[in-house]
Image (spheres, grey):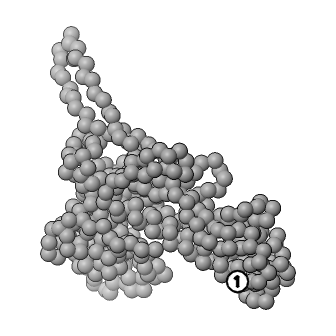
Amino acid sequence: MPKQYGTLQILDELSAIDNANIFEYGEDTLYQHIRDILAVHNMLTQDILGDFVGTTTDNIRRYGASAVTGEMVEVDEWGAADVQKTLVAGYDIGFPLRAYQYAIGWTKRYFETHSVADMAQNLVAAQTADIRNIKYQVTTALFKATNTNFVDRLVNQQTLPLKALQNADGTAIPINEFGTTFDGSTHTHLVGRAGGALAASDITALANNVVEHGVNGGEVVIYINKANQGAVEAFTSNFKPYQAPLLSPGGGSTADVVAGGTKANPYRLDNKPIGVWDGYITVWVKPWVPANYIICLLIGDNSRGDVLEFRTRGGGAGYGNLRLVSDHDHFPLRAQHTEREFGVSVWNRLGCAILYTGGGPAYTVPTLTQ
């Protein structure tokens, strides 16, 4: 039977072949199909990273920020001010690299005793585990509250300093474009609700915690869990909803509407923009945000970069992709594992702030699972 291309067709077709032995189907033909499936899977997983996760092969970078002091000195027409020497020392931010595997055990004996459908199901399980792991590593890096060290054992044994979002750790914070300074020993982007019910001022303050450092051409957004949608929508003075997708205001309505008559997308129920906060910040419901956490993100910061970096190994060997790990290149399907090498950590520590509303007063790291 001629094969149809398109990975969903390939997976459906392979899963439907219940009786065909892998040897009968042909290892070479099956390998080409699996290569196509993995190639599309790896392209789709780039979309999982979202707008706030960049990619890099760097293991460490210098964050050029320190407390810079000095002042302009008035002089007359013959004057010349004394030189004021300053040093922008900065500090290091590292990015981890880890190897993750899913055991598949595709040996000669496996091919003798299993069907093509069995292999297809095995591959789907590996892809699912890969997606869940990427999501877990990204959210763990975003929500963590403490700085840690990481030994880069897959490369050169260098100890790398991994950072959380700005967390009052004493590191210097750059001044903004308006000359405002920030105390690195007290300034934090991980905050908790002091007590009582969530207030609109809490969300506005969360947004200001990001905006006050400068937007630099980026877009500020707020992400919430669907469980907190009703509480956010109740702040009608600050929150203006998109029009319901299948409804329109009745005649004589004086309700505020988002500019352009924007309507919610009826087909995106758990990953959707729902309205605008304070007239300029789009509010999204995101399925990966834990309940009782509100996230404010700066996306597309032209000067400081992405909030998180997704590190892969350099060299173009495909280490950052999900791939088959075979003992012998002449028999690529006889692989014991699928594998992906990557690591995620914070880079732009000022481009995101998180509010915990579950009973604070301090920020609490959520319990995350794969």
Residue at 72% in and 62% down? 327
Residue 110 position, x and y percent, is 74, 78
Residue pushed farthest front?
A: 109
Residue 193 seen in the current view: no
> Which secondary structure lies at badge 1?
helix
Quadrant in which the N terminus is drawn? bottom right
Report the amino acid beneath label 1.
Answer: Asp
**Residue 353 vs residue 50: left or right?**
left
Question: Is 233 drawn above or below residue 302 in the view shown?
Answer: below
Structural crowding at the residue carrying mark 1, measured as other residues with C-alpha within 10 Å and reported as few (<14), some (14–19) or many (≥20): many
Closest to the observer: 110 or 73? 110
**Taking 65 as reference, is 103 left or right?**
right
Please tell me whether residue 105 is drawn above or below residue 220 in the rendered image. Answer: below
Question: Residue 103: percent from the left, percent from the top?
Answer: 62, 72
As drawn, 361 above or below 82: below
Residue furthest to the bottom in view is: 19
How many marks can you see?
1
Which residue is at 23% across, 74% downward? 358
Residue 194 appears in the picture as rendered: yes
The quarter holding residue 3 reads bottom right
Does residue 129 appear to the left or right of 355 in the view shown? right
Residue 137: image quadrant is: bottom left
Q: Residue at x 70, y 79 (%)?
A: 119
- Residue 258, given in percent of the width and then of the height, sits at 34, 71
57 relative to 290, above or below: above
Q: Which residue is mark 1?
A: 118
Residue beneath the point at 43% across and 52% down: 150
Q: Residue furthest top?
A: 78
Residue in the foreground of this view, choosing between 361 and 155:
155
Position of residue 359 measured from the top left corner of the image (x, y, whole percent)? 20, 74
